[in-house]
Image: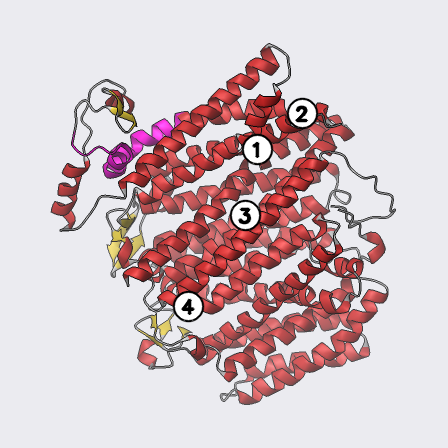
Amino acid sequence: MDDFLFLSRLQFTITTVYHFLFVPLTIGLGLFIAIWETAAYKSGNSEDERISRFWGRLFLLNFAAGVVTGIVQEFQFGMNWSEYSRFVGDVFGVPLAIEALLAFFIESTFLGLWIFGRNILPRGVHLACIWLVFAASCVSAFWILVANSFMQNPVGYVFNNGRAEMTDFLALITNPYFLHQFPHVISASLCTGAFFVLGISAWKMSHGSKDANLFEKTFKLALFLGLIGTVAVIFSGHLQGQSVARLQPMKLAAMEDLKKTADPASLSILPGVEIPAMLSFMIYNKPSGEVKGMEELQKAFEYRYGSGDYVPPVWISYFSFRIMVGCSLVMLFFIFYGIFRLVYLKRNLHKKMSMLMAIGISLPYLANTAGWLIAETGRQPWIVYGLMPTDKAVSIGVSSNSVIFSMTAFSIVYIILAIIIFLLMRREIYRGCVEKKITRKNTVITV
Amino acid sequence: MSLEVLWFVLIAVLWVGFFFLEGFDFGVGILQLFLGKSERERGTYIYTISPHWDGNEVWLLTAGGAIFAAFPSWYATLFSALYLPFVILLLALIIRGVCFEIRHRANLSKFRFVCDIALALGSFFPALLTGVAMANLAIGIPIENGNFTGTFFDLVKPYALLGGLLGFSLFLTNGALFLTLKIEGELQERARRFSKIAIALSVTLFAIVTILIREHSAICLIPLILISIAGLLVFRGYLKTAFILVALCTACSVAALFYSMFPNVLVSSISPDHNLTIWNAASSAYTLKLMSIAAAIFVPIVLAYQIWSYYVFRKRISPRSVNIEA
C-alpha cells in the first residue's frame, strides 16, 4: 500500500508538473499574440501580421502539448485517487466540470477557428477568436485554482454522509487562498510569456537575422509586459506569503525551515545566512511579531488530529522557495537592464547579454515549478488541508504494477513529446518571420 | 424529474455528443491512412477534421467532469476500475492530438508518414476502448463496496470486445460518410466506396449484438432498424441522409444502453447489492442544483458556437485547396 501511495504521488507529480510547463506560456503568450493581432488589425500592416504568425506558430506547438497533457488531469483523480474523488467530488468535481464547460469548449473551438479561419472569417471576427482563446485560458486557470484552493483551505462545505458536501458556492470562489493564488499564477504566466518572447527576440536580434528589426518590436512589447508581470508576481507572491502565514502556518515554517517559534523571526536567505526580524516584517509589515515554528505546530496538530507526523518535507519547501524568489529577482534585473539599455540608452543589447536573455527563458519555468512544489508539498501530509490525509485518498482497487506501467508509459511519451516540441520550436525560431509566398490559388487552409 | 435523473440523462447526452462527434473524427483519423495514397491525400483527409477535433474531444472531458461533479462515486469507481484501458486511451489521445499539430510542421515525408500512422493508431485505440467501456457498463464488472476486485481480463471478455468492435465499425462508418460530405473528387469517391463496406459491417454487428441482448425491449431494436435503413440509403447513394441516420443510430444506442442501466450507473457482477445507482452515487441536492443552472446556461451556448464553427468550415475541400507546405 505504501508503494502504491508513493507511486501514485510520483505519477501525479510527473503528469502535473509537466502539464504546467505549457499552461503559463499558453496564457502569457496568448495575451502577447492577442495584443499583436490587435495592432495588426488596426494598422493593416503585413509586417505586423507576419510577426503575429511567427509567434502564433510557437504558441500552437505549446498549446497542443498543453491540451493533450491536460486530458490526463481530468481523469487521474478517478484513476489513482478514487477515495479522494469519492470524498470530495461533491465540492471538487464542480469547478472541474465547469472548467470543461466554460473554458475548454471555447478554447478548443475558437482556436480551431483562429488557425484555419484566417482567410475565411471577417478580420474582426478572426481577431475576436484569439482574444476568446486567451480569455478562456484565464477562465480555465480560474476554475482549476478554485479547485486547488479547496484542497489548500477547505471552505463552503459541511461534513455529511461520510463525505464533504458543498453548502456555499460563493465561499468556494471567494476562498481567501484562491484570491491570493489566482493573481500570482496569472502574473507568473505573464512573466513566462514575456521571457519567452524576450529570450527569442534577443537571440534573433543579436544573431543578425534579416528580420532583426521585427524582433526589436516584439522585444519592446515583451519588456513592457515583463515589467508588469515581474512586479505583479513579486507583489502578489508577497501577499500570498502573508495569507499562507495565516491559513497554513506549517507550510510557512517549512518554507523557512523554522524549527522553533520566534518573535521577532529572522528570514533565512540561504542556510546559515539570516536577516534578523525580516520574516516578521514580511508577514506583519512591522519588525516584530510571532512566527510559529514546526515543533510547536506539530504539537498543535497532534493535539487536534491525534499522533502522526504533520511536518511536510522541509528541504523541498525550503529550497524551492529560494529558487522561486531567486529566479524572480534575476528576472526583475533582466527587465530593468533591458529597459535601461533599449529605452534609456537607445542601444542594442550586448551579444553576451542577449545570450543570457535566451537562457533566461528557463527562469520563469524554474520559478513556476518551484512555486507549485511549495504549494503542494507544503500542504502534506494532507490532501485536503486538515480534512483528509493523503494516504487515505488513493484508489483501492488498483495495483502498484498498473501504476508502474502507466507512469513508465506517460514518462516515455512525455519525454519524446518534449524533444519533438523543442526541435520543432527551434526550427520555427531559426526560420523566423520569413514566409514563403503562397503561390497556390484558391487555397482555403494555410497554416 | 428529480435532479439525479436529470443528470443521468445529461451525462447520456454528453456521451451521445462524444460518440457522434468523435465518431467521425476517430473514423477519419483511421481512414486517412488507408484511403489516402500519398502524403498530400492523407493530409487532405486529415484537414477535414483539423479545425474540429479538439472541440469534439472536449465532449469526452466534459462527460468525465460531469460524472465527477454529479456522481462522484461513479467517477471514482469507473475510472479506477478501468485503470489500464483508460491509461491506453489517454496515451492514444495524447499522441493523436499532438500529431494533428506537428504533422505539417516539417517537410520530411518520413516524419509525416510516422505522424499519419500514429494518428491512425491514436484514433483506433480510443474507438475500440470506448466501445469496450460502454459494453462493460452494460454487462457489469466485479465491484464490491465501490471498489474494483477483478483484473484487466475481467474487462476484456468476448461480449465487451464485441462492444468495442461495434463502436469501432460505427466510427468507421461515421468517418467514411463524413468524408463523402466534406471532400470532393477522387478522394470522395474512395470514401464513398468504403462507406458501403463499413455500413455492411455495422449492420451485421448490430444484428449480432441485438440478438445477444436477452431482454428485448423495443428501444434496443431502434438502433438496428436505423442502421439498416442507413445501409439501404448508402447503397442507393443518399449519403447525407445516411449520415444523419447513423448519427441518430449512435444516439439511440447510447440512449438504449443508459435506459437499460437505469437506475444503475455501474452494475456489479458480484451482487446487485453492490450496484452503484444514481441514488447512492449522486452528489448533494445543492451541488446538483448548481450544476443544473450552469448546464442550462452554458450548454446551449456551446452548441451554438460549435455548430457555427462547422458552418464556417462548410466548404468541401480537395487536395488542391489545401496548402501543406511547412
Question: Was residue A260 drawn as part of the magenta stretch in this picture?
Answer: yes
Q: On the same chain: label 4 and label 3? A: no
Residue B279: x %, y % from top left: 35, 69
Q: Which residue is mark 4?
A: B78
Q: Are marks 4 and 2 in contact (CB under 8 Å)?
A: no
Q: Nearer the observer, disc 1 or disc 3?
A: 1
- Looking at marks 1 and 2 on the same chain, the residue that comes earlier in the sequence is marked by 1
Q: Which residue is mark 1?
A: A196
- Looking at marks 1 and 3 on the same chain, the residue that comes earlier in the sequence is marked by 3
Residue numbers of the magenta segment: A235-261
Q: Which residue is mark 2?
A: A205
Q: Chain of mark 3?
A: A
Q: Chain of mark 1?
A: A
Report the residue at 53% width, 77% height from top: B256
Name the residue type under label 2.
Met
Q: Are marks 2 and 3 in contact (CB under 8 Å)?
A: no
Q: On the same chain: label 2 and label 3? A: yes
Q: Which mark is residue A66?
A: 3
Residue A36: quadrant of the picture: top right
- Looking at marks 2 and 3 on the same chain, the residue that comes earlier in the sequence is marked by 3
Pointer 4: residues within 10 angstroms few (<14), some, or many (20+)? many
C-alpha gap between disc 4 and disc 3 = 25 Å
Name the residue type under label 3.
Gly
Q: Nearer the viewer, residue B309 or A186?
A: A186
Residue A423: quadrant of the picture: top right
* Secondary element type, mark 3: helix
* Secondary element type, mark 4: helix
